[in-house]
């Protein structure tokens, strides 16, 4: 599975592509799309859209992992991020990617093991999980790769859980089929025994009638 992770931002949108095989994750590429505040909003969003479309066309991911927006005290910054996030999602949607979105805390939890991890811990774990020989820079790229790793981990967990549930249902169905066969055999055996008993009683009655007939004829 090839996953595109995105850390959206109007000034800097980080992206990272990873490929998974079983439990193994490896980075294929990453980068950062930067726009200047001197440009108009439509130009900046167009650059984000074009840059991500190019990355998608080059690496052909099938899955998208993108950060949810955290509306803290800086509403203006959150709105700018929302614009960039929208452009990113549209680019991915037009290319047919399936989307997963995660909060920063979810991503940290999945990658580091704690939702309170700091930036250095995230970068360290991303580097180790993806077996990189360097820290992914800038930080926006590390965050994008972390989002992709989070998506890979959670998708794998969901698949394992689903497969386990399916296996349990199958086992229950087979156990029920086996029980049904046992009960059917028991019913058949009981019916056969009843038939044999009736046949024996009929035979004894017929024999008694024949003997009585012979005595009467004498």
Image: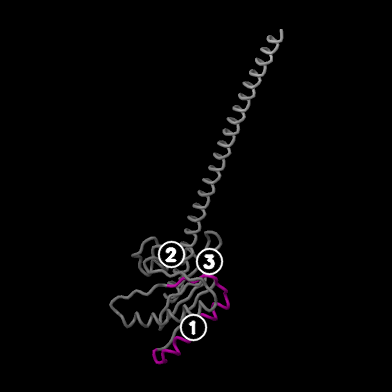
Element assignment for label 1: helix
Q: CA distance from mark 3 to mark 2?
A: 13 Å
* Quarter of the N terminus within the rendering: bottom right
Residue 52 left/right relative to 122? right
Q: Nearer the viewer, mark 3 or mark 1?
A: 1
The disc, 3 or 1, on the residue closer to the chain's N-terminal end is: 3
Mark 2 to mark 1: distance in Å?
Answer: 29 Å
Residue denoted by label 2:
125
Secondary structure found at label 3: strand
Q: Is residue 95 above or below residue 109?
A: below
Is residue 135 left or right of 118 when viewed as pictured? right
Q: Are marks 2 and 1 in contact (CB under 8 Å)?
A: no
First in sequence: mark 2 vs mark 1: 1
What is the span of residues highlighted in magenta in the rendered image? 37-66
Residue under circle 3?
26
Q: Disc 2 on helix, strand or loop?
A: helix
The tag on residue 49 is: 1
């Amino acid at each position: 599975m090839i996953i595109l992770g995105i850390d959206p931002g109007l000034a800097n949108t980080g992206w990272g592509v990873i490929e998974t095989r079983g439990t193994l994750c490896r980075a294929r590429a990453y980068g950062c799309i930067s726009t200047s505040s001197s440009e108009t909003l439509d130009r900046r969003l167009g650059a984000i859209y074009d840059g991500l479309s190019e990355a998608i066309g080059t690496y052909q991911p099938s899955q998208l992992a993108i950060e949810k927006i955290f509306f803290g005290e800086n509403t203006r910054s959150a709105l700018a991020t929302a614009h960039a996030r929208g452009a990113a999602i549209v680019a991915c949607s037009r290319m047919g990617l399936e989307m997963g979105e995660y909060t920063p805390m979810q991503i940290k939890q999945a990658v580091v093991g704690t939702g309170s991890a700091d930036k250095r811990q995230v970068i360290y774990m991303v580097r180790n999980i993806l077996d990189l020989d360097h820290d992914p820079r800038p930080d926006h790229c590390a965050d994008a790769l972390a989002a992709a790793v989070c998506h890979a981990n959670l998708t794998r967990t969901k698949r394992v859980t689903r497969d386990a549930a399916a296996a349990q249902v199958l086992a229950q169905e087979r156990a029920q089929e086996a029980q049904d066969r046992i009960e059917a055999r028991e019913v058949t055996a009981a019916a056969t025994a009843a038939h044999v008993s009736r046949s024996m009683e009929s035979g004894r009655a017929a024999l008694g009638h024949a003997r009585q007939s012979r005595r009467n004829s004498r």
